[in-house]
Image: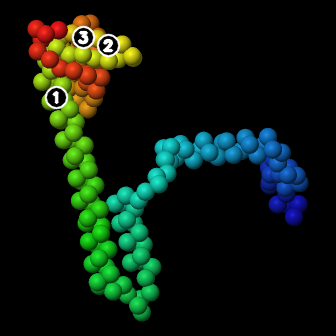
Amino acid sequence: MDAINSQMSPGFMLAQNRQMSQLEQSKVSQQVNSYNKSINEGRIPHQSLGKNDFLKLLISQLTHQDPTKPLKDTAFIAQMAQFSSLEQMTNMATNFKKMTDVVSASQAVSTLGKGVEIVSAGQSVRGTVEEVTPGQFPQVKVGDKFYDFSEVQKIFPAEAN
């Protein structure tokens, strides 16, 4: 036993002989959390399952099924259909988002050279749109300042402003 104790670090032996204080527990917990975040790249848990989660569950179910009672082919087909539907809905949602961005950018570009009324920070600004920056969040330049397109309240012919 003495040979083993002589190979152990003093900190290990000290930890065996007493409980950690609240401060020490807090420091260790903070270091562990910091390390876990660094290796998991700050992974944020989600409240819903995605298509990858569904596929993992299906594979896990197939891996751990009882070989004497394999999954019925109808149940398997139903799960694959659900997976296919989930994937199609996810793809549709992604495409709708892209389409919404394009429509929004197109609307912003259509205001070029027209008069607009913008409400920004509680103040109303009127002027002619001189520039447009398209993209996911388009902006319009009126005077010397850019405004989010979502702040445009009215659009009218340029000569009316």
Q: Amino acid at mark 2?
A: Ser
Q: CA distance from mark 2 to mark 1?
A: 20 Å
Nearest the viewer among 55 and 14 is 55
Residues tagged 2 and 3 counted as in contact (Cβ below 8 A): yes
**Position above or below: 55 against 34:** below
User: Where does label 2 land, which residue?
Assistant: 124
- Give whichever of discs 2 and 1 has the lower sequence position: 1
Quadrant assignment, res 136: top left
Indicate which label's residue lies in the foreground, 3 or 1: 3
Q: Amino acid at mark 1?
A: Gln
Residue 23 on image: x %, y %: 79, 40
SS category of the residue bearing label 3? strand
SS category of the residue bearing label 1? helix
Residue 108 on image: x %, y %: 18, 25
116 lies left or right of 70:
left
Nearest the viewer among 66 and 160 is 160
| Residue for point 41% across, 69% down | 57
